[in-house]
Amino acid sequence: MLNLMAILVLSYLAGSFPTSIIVGKITKGIDIREHGSGNAGGTNAFRVLGWKAGLFVSLVDIAKGTFATLVISRIHFGTAPFENPSIVMILAGICAILGHTFTIFAGFKGGKGVATGAGMLIALYPYALLTCLVIFILVLFTTGFVSVSSITAAISLPIVLFMFDRFLDMNIDPVLMIVSIIIPFFIIFTHRTNIKRLISGEEKSFEKLKIFRRS
């Protein structure tokens, strides 16, 4: 049990690395949470810091999820708590997501967990991530809203995993199936302010990405 606790704490700390906050301080001397949407994630970094900084932030946030799921989960301080290593990998990935969203290094106010969650999926089921990424891109190019794209991709995750398990015999871990059902609710929760802005018509979109836009 001590081994598991160490893995979970280390994964949370890895996820807690406040990428966009640090990059904002270095590149523009600002707290990114005081600009744009006020979120410490990749999307707001794109808006406030520019595409280069935004891309860097997103890649690091993705790497946090992958590192925790693939590397930290395999650290052994003693006996393994579960016979199935996938369970530890999933728990490590979840802790990284929680660390990213509620970072201990910035007053528990971080990002929304989408990029770090994607990093977790890279380590577990990259084909499922690619499918959800295609869905994300299609919705983004249709609506221009990253928030809508993120929520749609999250909702599609359990459906994609079910299809892979049922029709492609990929033997999806039951624990991951349960987690995949919970993830959309978590993503909707972290995007609750975006949903309010969408309803009020105040949510900002990336108009240049929309395929069907008014000239």
Image: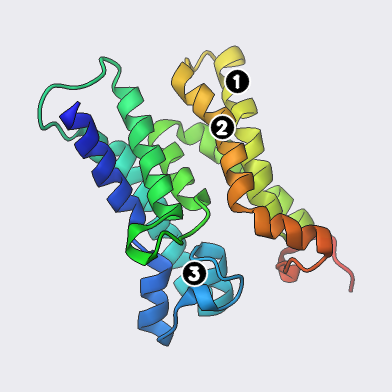
- CB under 8 Å between callouts 2 and 3? no
Q: Which amino acid does label 2 sit on?
A: Ile
Helix, strand or loop under label 3: helix
**Label 2 belongs to which residue?**
182
Q: How far apart are marks 1 and 3 (CA)?
A: 32 Å
Q: Can residue 71 be seen in this view?
A: no
Q: Which amino acid does label 1 sit on?
A: Phe
Q: Position of residue 79 (x, y in %)?
A: 13, 22
Q: Position of residue 189 (x, y in %)?
A: 61, 47
**Label 3 belongs to which residue?**
54
Q: Residue furthest bottom?
A: 29
Q: Which residue lies furthest to the front in this view?
A: 107
- Left or right of 128 on screen, residue 90: left
Question: Relative to the observer, which residue lies in front, 137 or 155?
Answer: 155
Estimate how packed mark 3 is, as few (under 14), some (14 to 19) or many (20 or more) residues with alpha carbons within 10 Å.
Answer: many
Is the residue 131 above or below the residue 46 in the image?
above
Question: Relative to the observer, which residue lies in front, 94 or 211?
Answer: 94
The tag earlier along the polypeptide, 1 or 3, is 3
The tag earlier along the polypeptide, 2 or 3, is 3
- Left or right of 155 on screen, residue 93: left
Q: Nearer the viewer, mark 2 or mark 3?
A: 2
Residue appearing at x 36%, y 32% in the figure:
91
Helix, strand or loop under label 1: helix
Q: Which amino acid does label 3 sit on?
A: Gly
- CB under 8 Å between callouts 1 and 2? no
Helix, strand or loop under label 2: helix
**Label 1 belongs to which residue?**
162
Q: Residue furthest left?
A: 78
Give the quadrant of the N terminus.
top left
